[in-house]
Amino acid sequence: MTTKTAITKRIEAQLDAAASARDVLAGDPDAAVKREALRVWQAARLARTHADLLESPRYGKTASFFLTDIYGPKDLSLHEQAVRRLMPLMTTVLPAAGLETVADAFELNALSESLDAAMLAALGGKVFDMTDADYSEAYRKVDRRADRERQIELILHLGQSLDRLTRKPLIGTTLTMMRGPAAAAGLGDLQDFLERGYTAFRKMKGAAEFLETVVSREKALLAAWAADERGG
């Protein structure tokens, strides 16, 4: 079993990796607005691809959380310093399963930062008026298929981690206990992420079919983009 010490080291490494990825764009004065434009476009694409899941009575709440917080435009960089400060408390209060969920979230964030930076370099000014063809062309130019597959793998892992949390005794109580310390440390959004994820997956009562649907669709899109087939 992975120790809490190993998990916290993994979190710290991913915080460093995300910061390094953003440094790639440091010389571009429009980097922040371009990054936001890319993430908004990606969020809209996700909503189109998974529209049926968003409208599903069983999966709708989880799909909304999944596509906005896990695989969408949420920016965890604002909380990196606060996470570093709160790490000792998180290690004490959260079970290993909870810490692993946080670690998955920050690894996914670090990889997404790196991929976004590469896509922005390939897109240039097109990011503000982007078509599916523009995105597909940039995807092939960046040529990081293995990293894209890892991104989907992390999405699956994070979904499975949240699903496992719903089966842990007293985890809901533990998350509630974290509210005050998290808010005081400036980590209210991260705390909210964990609580809403726990609630969404608990309500769904089993995530296997949902996760398989999302992952299979995203893998199919990667193949389509690589082959210059306009999917969405």
Image (cartoon, helix red, strand yellow):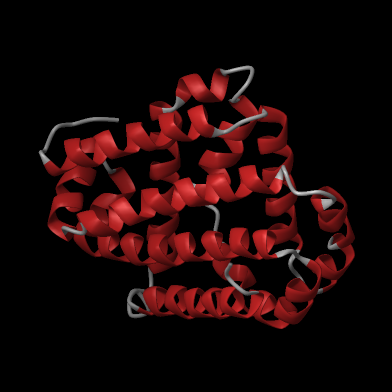
Whether residue 82 is visible to the viewer of this picture, yes or no, is yes
When the figure is inspected, residue 106 is found, relative to residue 136, above or below; the finding is below
Residue under the image location 37 percent in, 54 percent down: 151
**Can you say which quadrant of the picture contains the C terminus?**
top left
Residue 86 point in image, percent of width and height: 74, 77
Residue 29 point in image, percent of width and height: 38, 73
Quarter-of-image position of residue 198: top right
Left or right position of 142 against 64: left
In the picture as drawn, the residue positioned furthest to the front comes out as: 1
Left or right position of 184 against 9: right
Left or right position of 176 against 101: right
When the figure is inspected, residue 22 is found, relative to residue 188, above or below; the finding is below
Residue under the image location 38 percent in, 28 percent down: 49
Residue 60 point in image, percent of width and height: 60, 25
When the figure is inspected, residue 11 is found, relative to residue 60, above or below; the finding is below
Residue under the image location 21 percent in, 59 percent down: 144
**Can you say which quadrant of the picture contains the N terminus?**
bottom right
Whether residue 37 is visible to the viewer of this picture, yes or no, is no
Report the number of numbered marks: 0
Q: Nearer the viewer, residue 2 or 104?
A: 2
Residue 159 point in image, percent of width and height: 54, 45
Quarter-of-image position of residue 42: top left
Left or right position of 134 against 80: left
Residue under the image location 46 percent in, 46 percent down: 156
